[in-house]
Image (cartoon, helix red, strand yellow):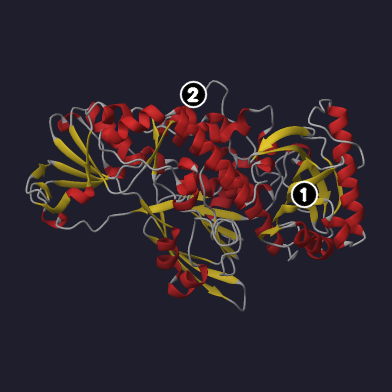
Amino acid sequence: MNKSVHNDIATAQELHEIAEGWLAALDTAVAARDAAQVADLFTKDAYWRDLLAAQWNFHTAKGNAAIGELLTTDGAESGIRNFRLDPRYSGPSWQARAGRNVIEVIFAFDTTVGTGNGVARLEKVDGGGVKAWGFMTSLQELEGYPEFIDDARPERVHGETANENWVDIRTKEEAAETDPEVLIVGAGQCGLMIAARLKAMGVRILMVDRIARMGDNWRHRYHTLQLHNELCTIDFPYTSFPRNWPVYLPKDMYAAWMEFYAEAMSIPVWTSTQFEGAEYDDSTGTWTARLNRDGEARTLRPKHVVLATGGVSGRKHYPDLPGLSSYKGTVAHSADVRPTPEFNGKKVLVVGTSTSGHDIALELLNNGSDVTMIQRSPTNVVNIDQANMVYALYKENRSIDEVDVVSVANDYDAAIRGYQDFGKRVRELEADQLQALEKAGFRTDPGYMGGGHFANYLHRGGGYYINVGATAKIIDGSIKIRQASDIETYGPDGAQLKDGSTLHADAIVLATGYLNQEADVREYFGDAVADKVGQIWGWGEDGEMRGAWRPTGQEGLWLQLGGIPQSRTFSKFLALQIVARLRGLI
């Protein structure tokens, strides 16, 4: 621990010794429940983000005194101990994190209920030595209830009788003659990931969705849609994509993957099934869930319900636009628009300038439409290559499991600082493009707190466009821009402007996004439950996403949200909480 630390430390062995010394000192101080000694190992402005290791929730402590107090109380009582370098992951290394140069250390530890991983970010201090500025702990495995993967995978598939094969077992699971322990509502990426995690931990599950075929929630979106995340960032739990697949997946290819994944993970799924709501019985700790499967009413009684009805948003949002009901042409949500040659020469107004608005406007233009976008609020615009810089961790030589550990190491303040640095860099790289957009009448937005598109995504679930071609068409005038503030009302022929003129339109496309799960919770579970759950998504006062992946306020109800990387990472934490409750560990 007393080894002098300099920025020019280059050898892996030196960094290894420094990290081991700091972890050993921490282990000794926590075991002795010496809060002052623990505090002295951290900088005064340090943070500790804990994900289920010290308590069954997500929590951040700020400042070394608070960390010392909590590590020697909640931490010690949870049995956090045996801090050690994890040989499965990269060794200690110098990294730039949130504007600070740190030695980043990935470690393992034990608790009373299982094992975990964490990240310590060590800074050199005056006089030599190191202290931690950043510290994260996360529970990763429950003792006695591991994920049955890798070395823990079963040797063979066994049914209840010697004559049952894999198909027989799958058929029985999908019949759901025995109530599932967990009912998962929604068969998109969020539902699939939590289903795979729970199945791998031995939980009896059933996933339901109103779609007719797995992947239809992507197949039925606009024709040219492609994912904006690079392939390296969107692995699903326990498997990777084929090595010859494109960097950016077309929607139908992704839909095919989801169908394959459900089968490969042996996930029991009921498609063409409407979840009609559920009531919770406090005395039995059980839900009574009502479903309609192909016209047949079914009742199930699971212990837990996971709502996975959208990555961040679910049902289509139809705004109340003045006078729109008097419009005589076609009005459609962007999710339902399929541009065809019949749009050739037609005038189309696209209301909304986030990702769907841009993509559908470009698709309409390419099909011969005369397109005008109606901008209702400033929008963050970032080119796709720059957008994916936010996922720089995935380009490093790390396993996906290691990335998932490191990616949750920031607390709110560190995350915001990182996004602000990212946003500033992008604005510098794209200054000419942003200036040209403003000149074309398009209002740009630096993102929440200057944090670019990703901060907007986490703060509000939208408000950005990842540019794959529409921006150039706006700049050259091929796609016209009008501000919603210029519109007095909508009328029979289109949009009536405040200057007395009319924007004529043969069709109006509402690229106005989706409602989030707050609407789903209220409809399916009623006002009392919805009031308990409260706001969903966006950073809460504790610096965590509201309602997502942790207790919601309603016992037995969970929300699995997020884009593909977040869904994968946090599905493990959600699964651990559910299994711990099912198996009596909480």
**Residue topped by disc 1:** 116
Residue closest to the far top:
244
Residue 449: image location, x then y, percent: 48, 48
> Seen in the image, is 315 located left or right of residue 565?
left
Say which of 261 and 393 sits in front: 393
> Seen in the image, is 151 located left or right of residue 457?
right
- Figure quadrant of the C terminus: bottom right
Neighbour class for label 2 at 10 Å: few (<14), some, many (≥20)?
few
- Figure quadrant of the N terminus: top right
Classify 326 as above or below 478. Answer: below
- Please report contact status of discs 1 and 2: CB closer than 8 Å, yes or no: no
Residue closest to the far bottom:
283
| First reached walking from the N terminus: tag 1 or tag 2 | 1
Residue 70: image location, x then y, percent: 78, 63
For the point 76% across and 44% down, which residue is it? Answer: 120
**Residue topped by disc 2:** 246
Dot in front, 1 or 2: 1
